[in-house]
Image (spheres, rainbow, N blue to C red):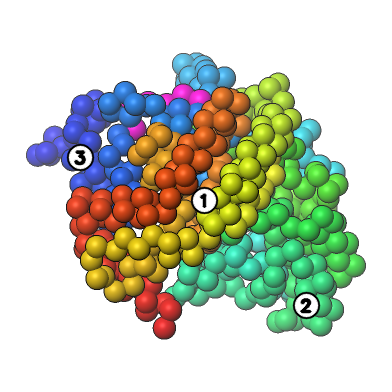
Amino acid sequence: MRKNWIAVQDVEGRPYEECVELFRKYINPGLVALLEMGEYTSIEPRSAHGAIIIDGKGREILDFVSSYGALNLGHNHPVVKAAILDVLHKEKVDLSKELLSPYAACLAHNLSLLTPGSLDRFYFCNSGTEAVEAALKLAARYFKGKRPLFIYAENSLHGKTLGALSVTGGQKLREYFPLLPGRCVPYGDAEAIEILLRDTPKEGDDSVAAVILEPIQGEAGVIVPPAGYLRQVREICDRYGVLLILDEIQTGMCRTGTFFACEQEGVVPDLLVIAKSLGGGLASIGATIATTKVFDTAYDNPHDCLVQTSTFGGRTTSCVAAMAALEVCVQEDLGRRAQELGERLLAGLQAIKEKYPEWIRAVRGRGLMVGIEFDEQVIDKAPYLPAKIPGLKNVLKEHLPGMVAAALLKQHGILGTLMLNNRSVLRVYPPLIVTEKEIDYFIGALDDILGQGPKELVKNRVNHAIGAAGLKFIAPWAGSLLKRQR
């Protein structure tokens, strides 16, 4: 072995501080610096079950992030874990692209029983962004390349590969990349879509292949559209002969109260993408689901059948995990559970909003997909700025939910985080197997943090940043924020 080689069995006993430094050196130093600001790097993840993570000191951390919706079933769900271990023990063929997988075939069959309408053709990949890429390619091939444009919504997030990024509305993520042509519209405004389609030709450089939307925008801050919005868009797409793609990567797998969020308006898209929790939290798998009409136009012949493939898509272990995850969703009725617990969570958070109106602008969501939008002006009531750092107050305002999340972790052992495209919103995505007691604990913990007042929150966060993380982490934030504001 090479000098300083680390064996697999030596990782668990290695000091966590050394692993943090290896991550900083080899993977992403900026991410480590960001996590240090919230004291997340002080938590060594040792084990996990359900909604609980156990750290290196034996402390229980309540996970209210669910890895951005990838852990609807929680950590290490026993049914999913047992299914994977069983297939590994039997030494089944896990990966062979020349031989057909019975597990992929049976997973597709089971999913077809859960998808709305005639969505019954499947492409399996490894992630959400890959599923979106496949949907965009399928839509383009459906129109034989004669319609190059896609309509997408402001502040949307569909992935970070180039195709998916092209239909992502978060401008910060799009800078410097060569992207596909598209048209961006306000989310929730069906008329804006119709105006665009009315003014574009059916073929040519300015023609539209598809509209892609999230039924509820996650990273934009859990934006729930007006009632009937998806139905209107479906009707508009039909009227102008345009495909509708729905991104259910975050909203799917029972997160919003039904297996797919689009079911709540009775809408059947032409293409639907799902990932994250499809693997039950223990496998990486995504799926692009199409109607037979759309799929057959593009790929249903030996000449084109290899145009869209994935080496690891549809491997046995991933499909087994997904089949087990679907069984849990159905047998434990997680859609109903998400709806009922979501009502309890939203009621508790609305009460906190009324109690602390200076802190919270809005609480919104559906099921257990909830966002808390904070009012950054509350920072003006916390004049604790011990050092004259340019732009520090603006940095604190931009990261207010992050400071609340850090306080929840440090004082109450709750894991939380903010949204990628909306830094004023705290993400509240507990696993769907969360208990009523854990929901109530979160509500009580948030009540306690806000009750301490903004001065105490700012004081604790700034003291940590200066004392533990160092001013070198604050100053660049202030500088970059001031640069953006200019």
At x 52%, y 35%, the residue is: 444
Of the two numbered discs 3 and 1 in the rendering, the one whose residue sits closer to the viewer: 1
For label 2, the crowd category at 10 Å Cα-Cα, with few meaning under 14, some 14 to 19 and many 20 or more, is: some
Can you identify the residue that label 1 sits on? Answer: 426
What amino acid does circle 2 point to? Leu
Q: Does the magenta stretch include residue 103?
A: no
At x 22%, y 57%, the residue is: 466
Instruction: Please give the label number shown on residue 17.
Output: 3
Quadrant location of the C terminus in the rendered image: bottom left
Can you identify the residue that label 2 sits on? Answer: 196
**Front-most of residues 394 and 303:** 394
Q: x, y (%) of residue 248?
A: 67, 48
For label 1, the crowd category at 10 Å Cα-Cα, with few meaning under 14, some 14 to 19 and many 20 or more, is: many
Magenta range is 45-50
* Quarter assignment of residue 481: bottom left
What amino acid does circle 3 point to? Glu
**Front-most of residues 228 and 326:** 228
